[in-house]
Amino acid sequence: LDAVDARMRDAALQSSSSSRDESYLGEVFRAHDGAAYGYATGTRARFVLGVSDEGSRAMDEREMRQIFDALAEAYAEAVCDVFSERCGRLEGERWRRRVDALFS
């Protein structure tokens, strides 16, 4: 999360206008066998997605943004669910189905 926080600070310093893409932080960390991509919501919720270089097709920036946008939307719905008893964790069946659908 430190790499995501650092990228958020960099993006805030470079950004003088508000845009939809400010939430998408791009590649925040590169390892020998993959990369981590970051996304931060306006409420400072942070998402990190690890992508392996082995056996998977390369994802372009547009696809990554779409995945993160959908994940952020599912997250917002889950945390705003007044009937959820999450105790700090998102464990609802609807949340799980939405996340699974993104990666299947």
Image (cartoon, rainbow, N blue to C red):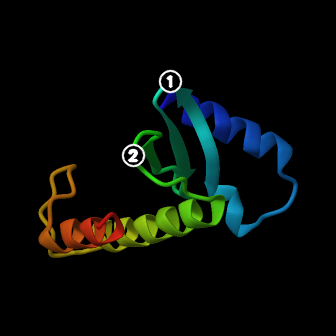
Can you say whether 6 is above or below 81 in the image? Answer: above
Task: Name which residue type carries label 1.
Answer: His
Q: Is residue 9 above or below residue 99?
A: above
**Residue located farthest toward the right when viewing the structure as drawn:** 16
Identify the secondary structure beneath mark 2. loop
**Front residue of this view, candidates 74 and 33:** 33
Question: At 54% across and 53% down in the image, what residue appears?
Answer: 58
Residue drawn at 41 percent across, 65 percent down: 71
Verify CB contact (< 8 Å) between mark 1 and mark 2: no
Give coordinates of residue 11: x percent, y percent: 74, 44
Instruction: Identify residue for label 2.
Output: 55
- Identify the residue at horizontal 64%, vertical 59% (top origin): 61
**x and y, in percent, of residue 32 in the image:** 50, 24
Residue carrying label 1: 32
Q: Is residue 70 above or below residue 33?
A: below
| SS at mark 1 in the image | loop
Tell me if mark 2 has few (under 14), some (14-19) or many (20+) residues whose alpha carbon lies within 10 angstroms of its own: few
Q: Residue 89: where, in percent of width, then height?
A: 20, 51
User: Which residue ends up furthest to the front in the rendered image?
Assistant: 55
Disc 1 versus disc 2: distance between alpha carbons?
Answer: 14 Å
Choose between 84 and 1: the one closer to the eye: 1
Q: Nearer the viewer, mark 1 or mark 2?
A: 2
Q: Where is residue 53 shown, x and y percent of the image?
A: 47, 40
Q: Quadrant of residue 23?
A: bottom right
Three-letter residue code for mark 2 = Gly
Which of disc 2 and disc 1 is earlier in sequence? 1
